[in-house]
Image (cartoon, grey):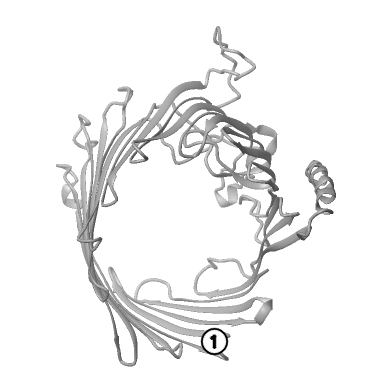
């Protein structure tokens, strides 16, 4: 209701201004995607729901060429008690190029250490006016998930939160202050059991970015602190001098800091260098960015170069990561990741890609059984060709890869070693008439301490467009033989139709068939069909 009133207040003055303009008052554009599916299985339990239907609607209403009102909705029939709700409706009016309002469901972002591109069900705004940078949101940042012991679902509380940004500058050069605070709502679910507990979190940070030397050197980074209460049912633990209105400290609350700094230098278009560093204390937590893991020190260096008029491109990256940054653990674990990639384009018809990666992890634990010393190496090479022949245009490439894993622990080394060789060849042929063919062959041989695995597969497909390319059809098949403990084979069949209905969108049908046979495991068959309608206006 509040959103509707707000939009009405914008529309009334626009109508009065528009009466003196020749621009259309309302312009509407967007897309509609409707789909329904069929699924059946014999020999195994069903892995997908049958009769799943979805509707994805995305529209934009432009008023008097001044205000944009995007409206999006994702609606599905698959709504079960132990899943996050996927029905989403959001409206995001945009006024000029300086103000955007948000209502309903939308993705909000404050910064890399506070709240980043995660869905919010609520409201907010973004202001970018001259040098002013301001953002605010309030709402549910996580839906409740009811516990379900029968399905081994622990559950989750509904989480309410808010956040804001206030800063000066532009995306390329700015200084911002950010704050995010969220709390789990205990009453949002029924009975729950350990280890599930309601939490509370607050994060504040400063983030910055600025270019130097005519944009050849760029710096961006952020420093922030967090307060995290792992169980809000604990007793309060007031800290002298800390304002209670800002955060309610309890005996399960911990404070910590996190920061990162990125440097990039591009002296010439052919050369670039970047250096990244991150440090997260063991108690640094933000529930708005689940990818951040506390207790880590990371450093990464990445030089890139282009040579021979961009025919040869070399990319590389070398990084280390340590935990136990405050000596709070019995042992420190270190990780090294290095990668090198080369692309060489000999001419328009031939090229080659080569890459190598090394990943190692080590710990200095005193006990031999707890000590870690693992190394993974991966190498791949792919020559590529394209040429005219056989009456059409041909694409051909080969890929060979080798992977080796070594566990150098003196006790477990023998049982934890593996190596794998794989080779793939793919050829495709396309004619002007729209007729096309493709075929692929794949072979893999993997050796483990406990046995080996072999895979051989052959795939073929063809396609053709009828009725002046209004109806596109394709047919494909893939047959695989693989063995480990037992011999197995698998057949996949694919059939698709897509028809364009002039100005009224397109209709497509996809049919998939999967048959699996084994000397030891359960044999099964699956059939899946998806009918889809898409309209863009």
Q: Nearer the viewer, residue 116 or 161?
A: 116
Decide which of 112, 351 is in the foreground and name it: 351
In the rendered image, residue 213, in percent from the top left (x then y), is placed at: 33, 36
Query: What residue lies at 37% left-to-right and 40% top-to-bottom?
Result: 215
Res 446 visible: no
Measured along the vertical axis of the image, is residue 432 above or below residue 143? below
Q: Quadrant of the N terminus?
A: top right
Q: Position of residue 33 (x, y in %)?
A: 64, 67
> Which quarter of the figure has residue 48?
bottom right
Q: Position of residue 31 (x, y in %)?
A: 65, 65
> 403 above or below 328?
below
Residue found at x 34% / y 77%: 480
Front residue of 59 and 440: 59
Task: State the SS at label 1.
Answer: loop
Q: Quadrant of the C terminus?
A: bottom right
Quarter holding residue 448: bottom left
Whole-percent x, y for residue 56 in the image = 65, 62
């Amino acid at each position: 209701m509040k959103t509707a009133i707000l939009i009405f207040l914008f529309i009334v003055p626009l109508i009065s201004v528009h009466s003196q303009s020749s621009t259309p008052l309302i312009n509407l554009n967007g897309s509609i995607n409707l789909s329904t599916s069929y699924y059946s299985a014999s020999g195994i339990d069903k892995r997908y729901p049958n009769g799943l239907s979805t509707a994805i609607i995305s529209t934009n209403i432009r008023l008097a060429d001044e205000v944009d009102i995007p409206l999006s909705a994702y609606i599905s029939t698959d709504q079960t008690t132990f899943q996050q709700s996927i029905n989403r409706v959001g409206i995001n009016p945009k006024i000029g190029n300086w103000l955007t309002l948000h209502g309903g469901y939308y993705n909000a972002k404050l910064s890399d250490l506070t709240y980043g591109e995660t869905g919010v069900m609520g409201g907010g705004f973004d202001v970018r006016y001259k040098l002013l940078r301001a953002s605010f949101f309030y709402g549910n940042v996580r839906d409740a998930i009811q516990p379900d012991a029968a399905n081994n679902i622990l559950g989750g509380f509904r989480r309410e939160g808010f956040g804001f940004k206030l800063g000066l500058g532009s995306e390329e050069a700015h200084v911002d202050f950010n704050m995010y605070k969220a709390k789990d709502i205990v009453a949002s679910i029924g009975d729950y059991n350990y280890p599930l507990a309601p939490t509370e979190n607050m994060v504040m940070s400063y983030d910055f970015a600025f270019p130097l030397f005519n944009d050849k050197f760029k710096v961006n980074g952020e420093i922030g602190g967090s307060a995290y209460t792992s169980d809000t049912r604990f007793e309060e633990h007031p800290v002298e001098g800390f304002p209670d209105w800002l955060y309610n400290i309890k005996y399960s609350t911990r404070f910590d800091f996190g920061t990162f700094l990125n440097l990039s230098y591009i002296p010439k278009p052919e050369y670039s260098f970047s250096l990244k560093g991150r440090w997260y204390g063991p108690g640094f937590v933000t529930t708005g960015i689940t990818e951040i893991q506390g207790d880590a020190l990371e450093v990464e260096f990445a030089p890139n170069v282009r040579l021979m008029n961009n025919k040869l491109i070399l990319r590389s990256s070398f990084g280390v990561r340590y935990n136990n940054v405050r000596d709070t653990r019995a042992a420190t674990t270190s990780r090294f990741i290095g990668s090198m990639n080369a692309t060489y384009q000999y001419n328009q018809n031939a090229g080659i890609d080569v890459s190598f990666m090394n990943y190692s992890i080590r710990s200095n634990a005193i006990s031999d059984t707890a000590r870690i010393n693992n190394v993974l190496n991966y190498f791949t090479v792919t020559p590529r060709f394209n040429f005219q022949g056989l009456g059409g245009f041909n694409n051909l490439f080969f890929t060979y890869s080798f992977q080796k894993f070594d566990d150098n622990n003196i006790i477990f080394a023998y049982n934890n070693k593996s190596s794998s060789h794989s080779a793939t060849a793919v050829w495709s042929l396309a004619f002007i008439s729209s007729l096309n063919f493709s075929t692929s062959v794949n072979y893999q041989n993997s050796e483990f301490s406990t046995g080996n695995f072999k895979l051989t597969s052959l795939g073929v497909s063809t396609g053709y467009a009828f009725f002046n390319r209004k109806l596109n059809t394709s047919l494909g098949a893939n047959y695989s033989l693989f063995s480990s403990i037992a011999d197995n084979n698998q057949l996949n069949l694919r059939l698709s139709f897509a028809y364009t209905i002039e100005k009224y969108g397109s209709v497509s049908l996809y049919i998939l068939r999967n048959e699996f046979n084994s000397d030891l495991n359960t044999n099964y068959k699956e059939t899946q069909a998806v009918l889809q309608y898409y309209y863009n206006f």
